[in-house]
Amino acid sequence: MELDVKLLMEIYGLINEFKKTYYLLKNKHNKPYSHRNYNRTSKRMIKPTRSNWDRFWLG
């Protein structure tokens, strides 16, 4: 029984890894950077494209 649970967990982990890499590959062209980096650099990336009014209201 214990072995089955370990096997299931391993398979589940592999599926998750596959999903992660699949989505990263799929979204490579729309988002050149990964999600973690996106959160860190989003303000710096968005600010130059905003108008002054947007900057005033949204920070």
Image: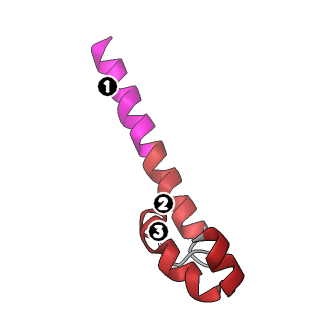
**In x, y percent, where is residue 51?**
69, 86
Q: Calculate the distance from the C-alpha at mark 3 to the C-alpha at mark 2.
A: 11 Å
Residue 14 in the image: x percent, y percent?
41, 44
Q: Is residue 30 above or below residue 20?
A: below
Q: Residue at horizontal 47%, vertical 65%? A: 39
Image disc number at residue 21: 2
Say which residue label 1 marks.
6
The image quadrant that residue 5 belongs to is top left
Circle 2 crowding by C-alpha within 10 Å: few under 14, some 14–19, many from 20: few
**Of the image marks 3 and 1, the number of the one nearer the N terminus:** 1
Residue at the top extreme of this rendering:
1
Amino acid, disc 2: Thr
Badge 2 element: helix
> Residue beneath label 3, please?
34
In the rendering, which numbered label is found on residue 24?
none
Camera-side mark, 3 or 2:
3
Q: In which quadrant will I find the N terminus?
A: top left
Disc 1 is placed on an element classified as helix
Q: In x, y percent, where is residue 29?
A: 61, 79
Which residue is at 45% across, 74% downward? 41
**Which callout, 2 or 1, points to the residue nearer the camera?**
2
Q: What span is in magenta?
A: 1-14
